Image (cartoon, rainbow, N blue to C red):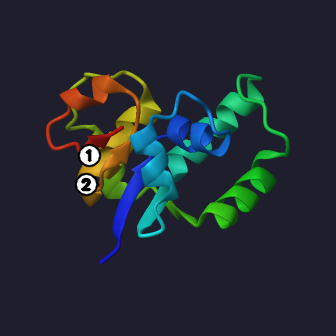
Amino acid sequence: MTSRVLLDTHAFLWALSDSPRLSAAARRVFLDQDRRLLLSTASVWEMAIKSSLGRLTLAKPLGAFLDEQLALNGIEILDVRRAHAERVATLAFHHRDPFDRLLVAQATFERLPLLSADETLDRYEGLDRRW
């Protein structure tokens, strides 16, 4: 059975740009053909907001960028479901960022490892953060 991994927004962007901030272990996960990589709709929302604020610059409009990169890298979208949103209400406030909180909720609800450099996330019970 192929394992699935949820990508934090920064992990997705750093992997695509071959950033030195991407750990060697994270790079291996991203390149592993036996893994199904997932990108949350929450990450799409985060990129849209940052792009509109001028805090994220992409070579193409967001939709075209995502269409291209998701297809090139075999990444699937994980839609935000009601149960994911409801899970956020039960999370401790270790992290205040709403995008990260939703990613934690999705990862724990779906029992997915989360590929993220954010060590603060280690405080969440039941979260399998990889980096």
Disc 2 from disc 1: Cα separation: 7 Å
Q: Which of 19 and 42 is in front in this view?
A: 19
What amino acid type is highlighted by mark number 2? Answer: Phe
Q: In this view, does 25 lie to the left or right of 123?
A: right
Which element type, helix, strand or loop, lies under badge 1? helix
The quadrant of the picture occupied by the N terminus is bottom left
- Which residue is labeled 1 in the image? 87
Q: Answer with mark 2 or mark 1, whichever residue precedes in sequence.
A: 1
What amino acid type is highlighted by mark number 1? Answer: Arg
Q: Position of residue 90 (x, y in %)?
A: 20, 38
Residue 111, quarter of the rendered image: bottom left
Whether residue 10 is visible here, answered yes or no, is yes
- Which residue is labeled 2 in the image? 109
Q: In this view, does 78 lie to the left or right of 105?
A: right
Q: Is residue 114 left or right of residue 38?
A: left
Residue at image position (61%, 32%) is: 19
Q: Where is residue 58 in the image (x, y as percent from the top left)?
A: 79, 37
Whether residue 79 is visible here, answered yes or no, is no
**Marks 2,1: beta carbons within 8 A:** yes
Q: Position of residue 18 (x, y in %)?
A: 64, 39
Query: Residue placed farthest to the right in the image?
Result: 60
Q: Position of residue 51 (x, y in %)?
A: 73, 32
